Image: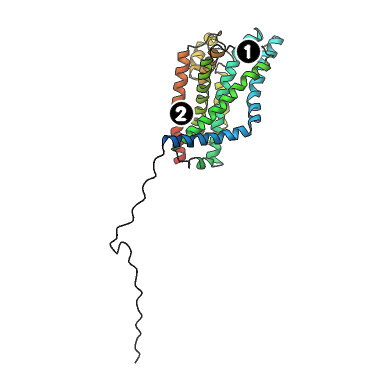
Amino acid sequence: MTIPLAVPETPVPETPAAAGAAPAPTSEPAPRLSLGAMLATTRALVERDLAVLLRDLPAFLLRTAMQPALFAFVFAYVFPRIGQGIGGARDSAAFAAVLLPGLMANTLMFQGVTAVALPLVSEFSVSKEIEDRVMAPVPVRVVGLTKVISGSVQALLASLMVIPAVWIATGFHTTIHWDHPLRLATLLPLGALVGSSLGLMLGTLISPRRINYLFALLLLPLTLLGCVYYPWVALSALRWLQIAVLANPVVYMSEGLRAALSPQIPHMPLWAIYGLLGAAFAAMLWIGLAKFEARVLS
């Protein structure tokens, strides 16, 4: 007869729930960032972009100054001296006074758009760098705002390079009036913010496969119909076109900078220039930040 051996049972430790213990407290939500901490993070993101710019500063300055210098050299120096084409029937210094503010406005728009839209498309589709940026302890829209600030700084720097470039390219015949420094000090940053806000909006709306159309279908018409090479009042002979170009923000940049640097040339009233540039900046920034947030969170 076999006697079965009793196997002692291993006691099972009681869980806190079984012992009637209270569950572990849940973790508290992360504290909200103070305004100072948010501003410090924003500054760090902007400084990151500007460090990249400073690293390639000589190439950036050469690239941004070359196009306006060539335009000024051909239109305000060569043509008047051979008696043909643009500027040929007038004094070269007078035409340079029209051309310089327009080229500065064109640079503000062109550089602002490209400095934001093209890197943004690459970060969303190729490098995925945007994923690193949105990990910063700030709201997503603040990250988009830092792109606008960085782009506007680049646009502002590029537009200032136009002044010596045009002055040299025209044979030192460009007459610049410094009687309205407040206009210049306010219109340059405002124009740079308009260009970079448009870049944010386009960079979030246009798919990477269609980004090449940005220059052919948008930037080129903005330039040619932006009163860059002629004042707005000169379009009075084509009234329908004079009204149509009012939808172009480059028109107000060109007219505003002429009011600051070439006040002897007839220009739009300042209230229209500041008001419509401010409205364009607010609208494009709001749309751009909303689309940026939606694109990141999708």
Q: Is residue 213 above or below residue 232?
A: below
How far across and down, in percent of the image, does residue 266 sit? 53, 8
Q: Is residue 281 above or below residue 26?
A: above
Q: Quadrant of residue 161?
A: top right
How far across and down, in percent of the image, does residue 105 sit? 56, 20
How far across and down, in percent of the image, does residue 84 sit? 68, 10
Name the kind of residue labelled 1 in the image: Ala
Q: Is residue 117 visible?
A: yes
User: Secondary structure beneath disc 1?
Assistant: helix
How far across and down, in percent of the image, does residue 152 sit? 53, 27
Residue under the image location 43 percent in, 29 percent down: 286
Q: Is residue 209 visible?
A: no
Residue under the image location 64 percent in, 10 percent down: 93
Q: Quadrant of residue 219?
A: top right
Separation of residues labelled 1 and 2 (CA atoms): 33 Å
Name the kind of residue labelled 2 in the image: Leu
Q: Residue furthest front?
A: 36
Q: How many neighbours does mark 2 have within 10 angstroms: few (below 14), some (14-19), or many (20 or more)?
A: many
Task: Give 207 or 146, whichever is nearer the viewer.
Answer: 146
Residue under the image location 52 percent in, 11 percent down: 267
**What residue did someone put label 2 on?**
285
Q: Residue furthest right?
A: 82
Task: Give 86 or 66, whichever is nearer the viewer.
Answer: 66
Image quadrant holding the C terminus, namely top left
**Mark closest to the chain's N terminus, 1 or 2:** 1
Task: Give 249 or 18, whichever is nearer the viewer.
Answer: 18
- The disc label shown at residue 96, or none: 1
